[in-house]
């Protein structure tokens, strides 16, 4: 691995998000923004420090679910607010460090290449924007990059500059140690700006290289509108990846697939499908507007308009419209219409009729329904769990199965004889 340390700034409040949740914990494609940045950083470095302050317990706990070898540095944000303050408590292992922002979820390891193969004292990122407002402007003269002026400190002429600071830097460890202590807070926001190291290093004739980067990878998320834009780009990447792996998608722009979903073989997704969590899909057909959450679907067809909830496993199974499945294992089962199967295990050759419901919850606890092979469950049956239906059972339509077991080979039928009252209609409504 490259001898590179990476520091990710994630201590800011992100007030422009107008949210109770720290900015870096907002989800993109099912994972917090910060997760995506760390995942890519790990491809480049074995020394990753995340700077935290605002909601630090939540940020740390969230990242520890996914990664086990991160360093967290706590910023003293009351006394040293700002991106420069964020680096005050940071020590790094390697001679070169890359500073990333926790609000840039679209960064990829490949897009950071330009920062790695350059030996300048500081490499700073620039992009050109038609509307540079809000960003730090990069003041460039004939001799190169001079300084960065923040939007709130810029005069009218500086505000016209369209080269903006993308907020990503690579520099030598010695630069960090020399200049971070020299940054002050004499500015409009009374903050310690990391951007001030450019002017300080420039005064000492250090080498500073500007690196032109593309907005698609380095856009910062500062508002919920930015969050939605970043989501669109992340979705395109995820879907393009899986289409290249052989997944067929109809109207892919209407499909949502989270980070963590995986496919094997050739599967087909119709329009409007949503697949989340760590779902695995193997050679299956997911029909229009179905929702699949954290489940495994193998050689099966699902939908249209079906809902497969977490911890389900479907093998060689057909699920039709308006069927909800939760925490169930279905092996070679057909459930074509309007059913709820929760906490259920069902085996080969079993047919679940329209409107069959597992009553898995008594208001306090959840219970299991076990269904054997070749069971035929008639329409509108309720299976009151816990219950076991053995192999080769027939359950008549409309039955409420309220016993705990139906033995192999039998019929279960629960019916009051039908009563017919002659001419009742005419007595009730009268004759015309
Ligand atoms: C910063 C840059 C600006 C650049 C822009 C690009 C400074 C002073 N300005 O501005 O030149 O154009 O990024 O997006 O650096 N953070 C901390 N501690 C803090 C404040 C912020 O860790 O005290 C973190 C935030 O969590 C965030 C990152 O630093 O991940 C950037 O902070 P933000 O407030 O978004 O900076 P900008 O105002 O956008
Ligand atoms: Ca920002």
Image (cartoon, grey):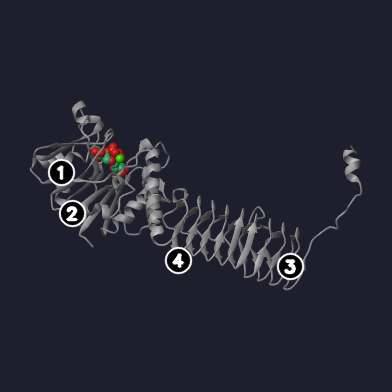
Q: Which mark is residue 96?
A: 2
Dot 3: what SS? Answer: strand
- Is disc 3 in contact with disc 1, using a CB cutoff of under 8 Å? no
Q: What numbered label is drawn on residue 265?
A: 4
Using a 10 Å C-alpha cutoff, classify the residue at mark 1 as few (fewer than 14 neighbours), some (14 to 19) or many (20 or more): some
Mark 3 lies on residue? 394
Looking at the image, residue 431 sits to the left or right of residue 263; the answer is: right
- Residue 326 lies, in percent from the top left, at 58, 58
Q: Which callout, 4 or 3, points to the residue nearer the camera?
A: 4
Q: CA distance from mark 3 to mark 1?
A: 80 Å
Mark yes or no: residue 81 visible.
no
Query: First in sequence: mark 1 or mark 4?
Result: 1
Q: Position of residue 422 (x, y in %)?
A: 92, 49
315 w.r.t. 261: above or below = below
Q: Earlier in the sequence, mark 3 or mark 1?
A: 1
Q: Position of residue 81 (x, y in %)?
A: 27, 38
Which class describes the residues within 10 Å of circle 2: few (<14), some (14-19), or many (20+)? many
Answer with mark 3 or mark 2, whichever residue precedes in sequence. 2
Q: Is residue 390 above or below residue 75?
A: below
Q: Along the line of sight, which residue is nearer the eye, 300 or 325?
A: 300
Q: Which residue is mark 1?
A: 179
Is residue 147 in sight in this rendering?
Answer: yes
């Amino acid at each position: 691995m490259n001898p590179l340390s990476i520091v990710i700034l994630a201590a800011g409040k992100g007030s422009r998000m107008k949210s109770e949740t720290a900015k870096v914990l907002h989800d993109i494609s099912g994972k917090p923004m910060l997760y995506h940045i760390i995942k890519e950083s790990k491809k480049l470095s074995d020394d990753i420090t995340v700077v935290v302050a605002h909601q630090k317990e939540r940020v740390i706990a969230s990242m520890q679910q996914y990664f086990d070898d991160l360093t967290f540095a706590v910023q003293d944000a009351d006394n040293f607010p700002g991106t420069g303050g964020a680096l005050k408590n940071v020590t790094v292992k390697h001679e070169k460090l890359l500073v990333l922002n926790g609000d840039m979820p679209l960064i990829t390891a490949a897009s950071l290449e330009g920062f790695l193969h350059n030996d300048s004292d500081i490499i700073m990122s620039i992009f050109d924007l038609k509307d540079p407002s809000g960003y730090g402007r990069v003041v460039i003269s004939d001799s190169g990059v001079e300084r960065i002026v923040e939007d709130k400190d810029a005069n009218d002429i500086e505000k016209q500059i369209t080269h903006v600071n993308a907020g990503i830097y690579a520099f030598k460890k010695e630069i960090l140690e020399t200049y971070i202590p020299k940054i002050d807070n004499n500015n409009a926001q009374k903050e310690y700006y990391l951007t001030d190291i450019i002017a300080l290093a420039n005064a000492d004739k250090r080498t500073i290289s500007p690196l032109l980067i593309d907005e698609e990878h380095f856009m910062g998320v500062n508002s919920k509108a930015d969050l939605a834009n970043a989501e669109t780009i992340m979705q395109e990447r995820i879907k393009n990846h899986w289409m290249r792996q052989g997944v067929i998608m109809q109207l892919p722009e209407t499909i949502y697939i989270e980070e963590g979903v995986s496919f094997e073989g050739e599967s087909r997704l119709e329009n409007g499908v949503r697949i989340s969590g760590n779902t695995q899909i193997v050679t299956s057909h997911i029909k229009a507007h179905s929702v699949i959450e954290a489940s495994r679907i193998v050689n099966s067809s699902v939908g249209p308009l079906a809902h497969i909830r977490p911890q389900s496993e479907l093998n060689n199974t057909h699920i039709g419209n308006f069927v909800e499945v939760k925490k169930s294992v279905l092996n070679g089962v057909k459930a074509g219409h309007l059913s709820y199967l929760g906490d259920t295990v069902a085996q080969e050759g079993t047919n679940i009729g329209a409107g069959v419901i597992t009553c898995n919850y008594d208001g306090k606890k959840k219970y299991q329904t076990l269904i054997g092979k070749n069971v035929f469950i008639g329409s509108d049956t309720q299976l009151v769990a816990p219950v076991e239906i053995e192999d080769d059972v027939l359950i008549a339509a409309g039955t409420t199965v309220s016993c705990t077991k139906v033995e192999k080979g039998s019929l279960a039928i629960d019916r009051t004889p039908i009563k017919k009252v002659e001419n009742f209609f005419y007595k009730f409504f009268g004759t015309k």
